[in-house]
Image (cartoon, rainbow, N blue to C red):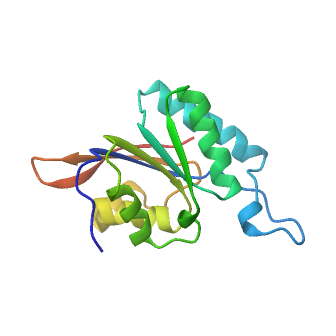
Amino acid sequence: MTVPLPPPNRIYLLRHAEAALAEPGQRDFDRPLNEKGYGDAEIIADQAADKGYRADLLISSTALRCRDTADAVHRAVGVGLDVRYVDALYNATVDTYLEIIDAQEAAAVMLVGHNPTIQQALETLIGSEAMARALPGGFPTAGLAVIDFAASINAWCLTDFVVV
């Protein structure tokens, strides 16, 4: 597994907000956010915007709950945010997440994805010890990790973790 090096210099990892349970016959892929999830997606997007957290590129899984979460971020930061939807993020491995991030030339990239892969990506970037200290209960829905590359130590560091 290869850990990405800059660019990007900042990575945002956003786990989709809380999804509705699947209706009978409904595919997991097609589950929308539930009422709480819609509210949480708006709140986390607004909190990120208020803190000045803005990606140059947002890459989201094509699963409905991720698209709904990405839409909230897009509304909060306004026009000018390049948004791409990538089928490969649904049921992907951590290697796929990191390869997608590593392939970007943008200075700041946000990835909207699923657990457990989003948590595994964060752990790969910052290390198991830092992960355990920052998120002892795991990566919550609508959680946003802000990770910066510290050139002085040649490593990724968790700058902030925003939760609802």
Image side of residue 5 versus residue 49, left or right: left
Q: 49 above or below 24?
A: above
Image side of residue 104 versus residue 112, left or right: left
Q: Toward the viewer: 53 or 95?
A: 95
Q: 46 above or below 38?
A: above
Quadrant containing the C terminus is top right
Please count the marks in the image. Answer: 0
Q: Toward the viewer: 42 or 129?
A: 42
Image side of residue 148 versus residue 112, left or right: left
Q: Position of residue 32 (x, y in %)?
A: 76, 53
Identified at 65% across, 49% down, the residue is 67
Identified at 84% across, 68% down, the residue is 26
Identified at 35% across, 41% down, the residue is 108
The picture quadrant where one finds residue 71 is top right
Q: Position of residue 56 (x, y in %)?
A: 41, 36
Quadrant containing the N terminus is bottom left
Q: Position of residue 31 (x, y in %)?
A: 76, 59
Image side of residue 85 versus residue 21, left or right: left
Q: 20 above or below 26?
A: above
Q: Position of residue 44 (x, y in %)?
A: 56, 38
The picture quadrant where one finds residue 51 is top left
Q: Residue furthest right?
A: 24
